[in-house]
Image (spheres, helix red, strand yellow):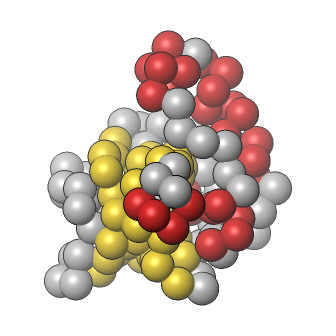
Amino acid sequence: MSDNLWGYQPSSGHTAGADLTGFSVEATDGSIGKVDKHSDDVGSAYLVVDTGVWIFGKDVLLPAGTVKRIDTENRTVFVDLTKDQIKDSPEFDKHKHASDPGYHAQVGGYYDSYRIV
């Protein structure tokens, strides 16, 4: 993963402003859901992934630095995490996400433990 957890890796193929909503999301060991929303904000770019029935409807917040590659032709985002790593991640909290500055630090701390820099 990249040095900047909250920014897309240059090699990911992400183009600023590209709409990733509805793209399938693939972990290193299989599909985890679809992009529900995303942000390109510098220093706080992310994906919110709706995992559907896979984790009983849990939404997860994935920092953009976890994105390994984006295949725009097949509308698929590949992340550098396993299904279990994502399953065990903190649940997305839309209220804390919008108002609690420590929330990104908490989520970032979880994903930092899996980073390979």
**In this view of the protein, which residue sits in the foreground, 44 or 47?**
47
Image point 67% across, 43% down: which residue?
Answer: 90
> Does residue 80 show up?
yes
Looking at the rendering, in which quadrant would you find the N terminus?
Answer: bottom right
Q: Residue 13 placed where, x, y %?
A: 34, 72
Left/right of residue 103 with respect to residue 46 in the rendered view:
right
Residue with the most extreme top position: 99
Viewer-proximal residue among 33 and 98: 33
The spot of residue 12 in percent (x, y) is 42, 71
Q: Nearer the viewer, residue 78 or 4?
A: 78
Is residue 15 visible in the rendered structure shown here?
no
Q: Residue at x 23, y 56 (%)?
A: 21
Residue name at image x 72 percent, y 56 percent: 88
Q: x%, y% of residue 76?
A: 32, 76
- The quadrant of the rendering that contains the C terminus is bottom right
Residue 61 place in picture, x, y as percent? 52, 46
- Residue 106 vs residue 73: left or right? right
